[in-house]
Each structure stands twice: as structure tokens, then as C-alpha cells.
Image (spheres, grey):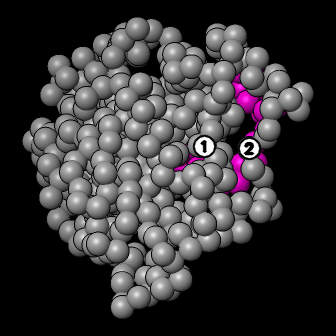
Amino acid sequence: MQDFDAHTPTAAHEMAVDCLQAGVEAVLPERVVYESLSLDGDLLSVAGATYDLTAYDRILVVGGGKAGDGVADALEAILGDRIDAGVVVTPNPGEGTHVERLPGDHPVPSERGVESTRRIVELVSNLDERTLVLAAITGGASAILPAPADGISLSDLRQTTDELLESGAEIHELNAVRKHLSTLKGGGLARLASPATVVGLVLSDVVGNDLGVIASGPTAPDETYYDDALDVVDRFDLDVPKSVRTRLARGSAGEVSETPKPGDDVFERVDNHVLADTFTALDAARDVADERGYDSIILSSRVRGEAREAAKTHVAVAEEVLATGNPVSSPSVILSGGECTVTVRGDGSGGPNLEFCLAACPELPEDVVLASIDSDGLDGGTDVAGAIVDSSSVDQRDAHTALASNDALPALADADALVETGPTGTNVNDLRVLVVGAGE
């Protein structure tokens, strides 16, 4: 059971937290892999596809991200000593028998992440057709698995990542840049491993499950170009290092090889399977609400945009439920997921989920509770998952003052409104719960 620490003074608060907990537990990597993979003799089934292990002389496990450790644990339990070697890179590596666990960092890439990722590059280079590579592709791997391209230093990557994170750029835009500064992202892993068979085991933290964006698409074709990356840099007026702009400009001029595109031969023996995503978590949360007699609805698993603007929409939905009984009748549980962003204008502490809750709480009707967390347990650069609020949590004046400096964390901490889980070992974006009415 994933531990959730939150102040729950009412049944509605308890309901919100229970829904969040059920959602996170449904996408824990061990559970997801056990439900999606099975071994029957020499036949390995992965989400409905079957692989005859007698066709391979070696089985390798590589990859990483926030859920990489859990994926490796499950694969070791299923395959045991059939695994010949493996390396996964995660922020909090555990210990494995057949798959080595190495450290990396998120959201800003680190030197230890570079060293750990180098081990993966070495392992998947010079493979043949009788090798099966099981690749754990999970949220956070873009930063956790840095492999700087020629001429790009780690400090260049760090500065560029910081600029992107603070700009308010969406994940698609952020990854368009990072893929063109890496040898592993944007289909790079598939290119290195070819002609081996590569099976991507994907836990999606990307709205719409775009395989080219999840973890910056190491096993997927890249539909972005150097021109796209340059456009992001220019449109957000990013202060990137000279080496970054030079590489992107050279790539745009055709002087540097592009990432592999759809139809490239390196993808002939690559299969990617999305084993879990935001909707998986929301569906589990909805089951809890239904079991307890609430009228429930999943608004969308694809909410994005500025957190404080999305908050207004969710408040409006709660108001509509109370006023007209649409789109569900009270008592109800309204669920959404996705990934909101924050354009940083101040120097405070917070994250998208904290800012979402702080912007919403002064406007919430009475008898409504709102909770929002990042499913990885760490919202933005904080060490809390998110918050749970009602109309009395923070008054409008204090909320506006804190929002002006992007300082949601202390305001919500003072209100005893934080939700703390610690790192959950998974990541499928943000999860939000509106509880309207007390329920049964």
C-alpha cells in the first residue's frame, strides 16, 4: 500500500485521498508488469503480443525513469535467470539479482546520470538479431537518462533543461529540444540496439501517450526536427548555451545527422507497449468512488495548460454540478488527469499541483473538496505530492499574494493542506479529484 499523509477532517477529504491512493497504486510498476506480462514455457506474452524466447541467445533489460526500478523487479520475478544482463537508471536505485540498478536524477540531469546511462549505451551497442532487449521506458527518463550528444556538455544540458522548465513550455516542446541534444533520445536507443528485437515496456507520463515524447522516445521514431527545436528556443526566448544553439543550427543546415524518423529500418524489429497511463489511474480511482455510492465521472485524462487557469475550469464544473446536476449529480466524484504547467514569474516554492489547488480554493463552493497530486509523489521541485483544499483553506487575498510569487508551498503548508507520499516509484502525470457533496 502506498502511504498517503494528508489532513482529512471530513468524509469528503477522506474520499479524495482514497481515490488518489487507489489511482497511484493501480500504476505501480510491479503491479502493471505482472498484469501485462506472463511466461508460459518459452513463450513470453507482453500485452497480447507473444515472443518465442528460443529465437534469442540473449535477453537484456535496459532503460529507466521513475518506475524503472519496479519494472526491473517485476521482470526479474517473471524471467529470473533467463535475463543475461541489464541496467536500469532511477533516482532511488534498489538492488537486483540480474539487472543492475544505477542512479540518475530528475528533473535536472546529473553527472552520475551521465555515467549510468553510458553503461546502457555500452550494453546495447553491437547487438545481433538473436538478442531480445526489454526496455523500461517510464516517466522522468528524459532527465534521468542523459546521453549528451557530441559537443554538448552536462552543464549545457542542465542550463537548457532549467530554461525549458521555467519557460512554461509543454512536454512536447521540451522534448523536441532534448531529443536533438542526445544520442539516446529520439529513437537513439533503437538505433544503437538494431538489429536486435526491442520491446518497449512503457508507463506513460505524457498526455495522449505519444511514444515519441514519453522519455523523449528512445525506442520510437522522432517526428520532430532540428528546426522544431530551434523554434522552441526562439519562441520562448531561452538563454541556452552557445554550444546548444550551434548544434541545433548545424542540424537545421544538414550538417548533423537527424534523429531516426518513421519508416527508418532501425524500427523494423521494435515493438512498444503502453502498459499504463493516466487513464489507468483515473479508472481505478473511479472504481473506488462508485463502490462508495458517489456519482462519478472522468472529465479528461488530458488536461494541460497553465495550472491556475485549469483550476478555474474545475471550479466551474463543481459549481455546475451544484447548480444543475450536470455533468453528474451530487454527491459526486469528478476526476481528471494530465499535466499542467506553471510559467514561473516569482522565486517562491511550489509546483503545478500546488498552484492548481491554491488558485482554486478561494473560489470553491462550500461542500466541495479538491485534491491534486503528481503521481510520482514530488510536485515540481518540491518534496510533497500536492495538496487537498476546500473553500476555507486559504483566503483570496493570501492566495493571490502567494500566486504572484509562485509561492504555493508555504501557503498550503500553513493551511495544513499538503499531501505527502514520498517518491511513489511511478509516474503517470497529475491526478485530480473533486468531491462535491458528502456522499453516503
Residue 85 or residue 321, whichever sits in front = 85
Lateral position of residue 382 relative to residue 238, left or right:
left
The local secondary structure at tag 1 comes to loop
- Residue count near mark 1 (Cα–Cα under 10 Å), binned few <14, some 14–19, many ≥20: many
Answer with left or right where residue 344 lies relative to residue 192. Answer: left
User: What amino acid is at disc 2?
Assistant: Thr
Q: Residues within 10 Å of mark 2 (few under 14, many from 20)?
A: many
| Inter-mark Cα distance, 2 to 1 | 8 Å
Looking at the image, which residue is at 66% across and 27% down? Answer: 150
Dividing the picture into quadrants, the one containing residue 90 is top left
| The stretch drawn in magenta includes residue 368 | no
Quadrant housing the C terminus:
bottom left
Q: Residue furthest right?
A: 253
Label 1 near label 2: C-beta < 8 Å? yes
Range shown magenta:
212-236
Q: Looking at the picture, which amino acid does disc 1 mark?
A: Lys
- Residue 185 is labelled as 1
Q: Secondary structure at mark 2?
A: loop
Determine whether 8 is above or below 270 in the image: above
Q: Is residue 102 above or below residue 200?
A: above
Q: Earlier in the sequence, mark 2 or mark 1?
A: 1
List the residue tagged with mark 2: 259
Residue 305, percent from left and from top:
57, 35
Residue at 78 percent of width and 52 percent of height: 261
Image-based side of 125 in relation to 434, left or right: right
